[in-house]
Amino acid sequence: MKGWVNIRTRETKKARVEIIPMIDAIFFLLVFFMYSSLSMVKMSGMGVSIPKLVKAPPQQKVPPKPPKRYIVTMNRAGTTFINLDEVPLEKLSPTLQGYIKNDPEGTIVVNVAKEQTVQKLVDVMDKVNTVTTPKGAPATVIVATSPVDPKAESANQGL
């Protein structure tokens, strides 16, 4: 076996798959297909007429005044008041009609003491609901409730 020469064989290298060039190729294909799909779609839109710029009117510097309130109160004794002026229940509607005739934007606030019966509240509301503005529309009416604050409640007990 002398004639045999020991041939050294090369070591076989393991194959490696490089993924970075493959990612680059995938992104290139993705961009290519996105761009080509956008160019294949016919972009058509509807014509829109945009309004021309118009100068806005100057804003009011003074805010508008809130409407006047006419507070109708019936206290525990059954006496009826409009703002702090005593008015008999029979004259409540004509008096309020005069106020609303002079100030159609006015608001009527009804405040009946919680000690009064529901019938007294209904009587006051019947008188108030007959009041109309000069145009014939019913006047704006708000029904007030008793305050939750004990200090404010004690202040209203004198009415």
Image (cartoon, rainbow, N blue to C red):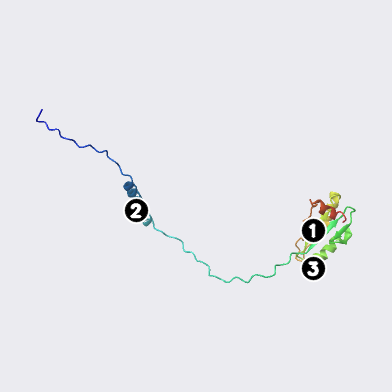
- The residue mark sitting in front, 1 or 3, is 1
The disc, 2 or 1, on the residue closer to the chain's N-terminal end is 2
Q: Which residue is mark 1?
A: 109
The disc, 1 or 3, on the residue closer to the chain's N-terminal end is 3
Residue kind at label 2, given as amino acid type: Phe
In the structure shown, which secondary structural element does the residue marked by tag 2 occupy? helix
Q: Which residue is mark 3?
A: 102
Would you say the residues marked 2 and 3 are in contact, meaning their CB atoms lie under 8 Å apart? Answer: no
Residue shown at the point (82%, 64%) measured from the top left: 97
- The residue mark sitting in front, 2 or 3, is 2
Residue 53 vs residue 90, the one in the foreground: 53
Position of 15 compared to 39: left or right?
left
Residue kind at label 3, given as amino acid type: Asn
Residue shown at the point (34%, 53%) measured from the top left: 32
Residue 70 x %, y %: 81, 62
Q: Is residue 125 visible?
A: no
Assess disc 3: are there few (<14), some (14-19) or many (≥20) residues with their C-alpha within 10 Å of its C-alpha: few
Q: Name the image quarter holding residue 9.
A: top left
Residue shown at the point (82%, 55%) measured from the top left: 111
Residue shown at the point (89%, 56%) measured from the top left: 79
Q: Name the image quarter holding residue 136.
A: bottom right
Query: Which image quarter is the N terminus in?
Result: top left
Mark linked to residue 32? 2
Assess disc 2: are there few (<14), some (14-19) or many (≥20) residues with their C-alpha within 10 Å of its C-alpha: few
Position of 36 compared to 85: left or right?
left
* Relative to 39, residue 16 above or below: above
Residue 24 vs residue 11, the one in the foreground: 11
- The residue mark sitting in front, 2 or 1, is 2
